[in-house]
Image: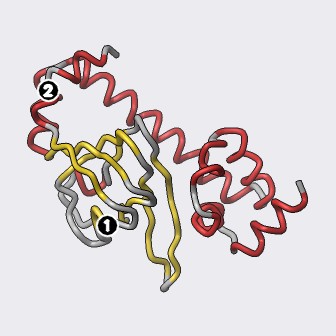
């Protein structure tokens, strides 16, 4: 995909600088925007009986939306917040749809990206069922080592489905 195709629609994006711990969407709200991360890190998380569970991390060059809410206008199952100071580009649902309707190549790219996210979520789901925490940690190191360099350990532990103490033990065994 050629970046110039996206640049044709750059006027539809709103560039924002946000501080760490900025909530872009709360669980139960309807998502009205999608985001592209120029700088920084965002996470998707949810509340499980008072416990903060991190579902996914997004870094520079990645787009993120709470797709179940953004596409269906249903209340979001997740929260979206920044972990560190960020520069993001937001786009409304209406403007995003305009881009999809205007550019078959971008629409195809978005469809492929969405399919790849589905495959990622299937693997994540299976990993939670069949892999122990040590194996999930090793997969994270192999697939996304930059996360371990930038993200606070309590978020990583939450993402792996373990306590920070358990994560510390796993890290010390390596």
Q: Position of residue 128 (x, y in %)?
A: 66, 58
What is the image's colouring? secondary structure
Q: In the figure, is residue 86 to the left or right of 31?
A: right
* Quarter occupied by residue 91: top left
Element assignment for label 2: loop
Q: Residue at x 58, y 52 (%)?
A: 150
Q: Residue at x 76, y 75 (%)?
A: 165
Q: Counting residues from the N terminus, which is met first, the one under dot 1 or under dot 2?
A: 2
Q: Residue furthest right?
A: 173
Query: 147 and 137: which one is in front?
Result: 147
Q: Residue at x 80, y 57 (%)?
A: 134
Q: Position of residue 51 (x, y in %)?
A: 52, 80
Whole-Å distance between the Cαs marked 1 and 2? 26 Å
Q: In the figure, is residue 158 to the left or right of 89?
A: right
Vertical relation: 151 (above or below) 47: above
Q: Position of residue 64 (x, y in %)?
A: 35, 46
Vertical relation: 108 (above or below) 71: above
Residues at discs 1 and 2 in contact (Cβ within 8 Å): no
* Quarter occupied by residue 152: bottom right
Mark 2 surroundings: few (<14), some (14-19) or many (≥20) residues within 10 A: some
Which residue is identified by label 1? 23
Vertical relation: 55 (above or below) 110: below
Which residue is identified by label 2? 9
Q: In the figure, is residue 7 to the left or right of 45?
A: left
Q: Position of residue 112 (x, y in %)?
A: 39, 27
Q: Residue furthest bottom?
A: 50
Q: In the figure, is residue 79 to the left or right of 4?
A: right
Query: 148 and 133: which one is in front?
Result: 148
Element assignment for label 1: strand
């Amino acid at each position: 995909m050629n970046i110039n195709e996206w640049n044709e629609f750059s006027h539809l994006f709103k560039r924002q600088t946000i501080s760490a711990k900025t909530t872009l969407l709360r669980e139960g709200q309807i998502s009205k925007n999608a985001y592209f991360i120029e700088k920084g890190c965002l996470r998707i998380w949810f509340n499980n009986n008072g416990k903060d569970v991190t579902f996914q991390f997004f870094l520079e060059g990645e787009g993120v939306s709470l797709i179940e809410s953004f596409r269906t206008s249903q209340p979001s199952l997740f929260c979206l917040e920044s972990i560190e100071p960020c520069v993001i580009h937001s786009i409304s649902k209406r403007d995003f749809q305009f881009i999809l309707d205007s550019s078959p190549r971008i629409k195809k790219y978005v469809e492929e990206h969405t399919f790849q996210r589905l495959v990622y979520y299937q693997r994540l789901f299976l990993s939670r069922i069949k892999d122990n925490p040590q194996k999930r940690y090793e997969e994270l190191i192999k697939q996304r080592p930059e996360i371990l360099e930038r993200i606070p350990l309590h978020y990583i532990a939450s993402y792996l489905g373990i306590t920070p103490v358990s994560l510390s033990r796993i890290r010390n065994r390596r």
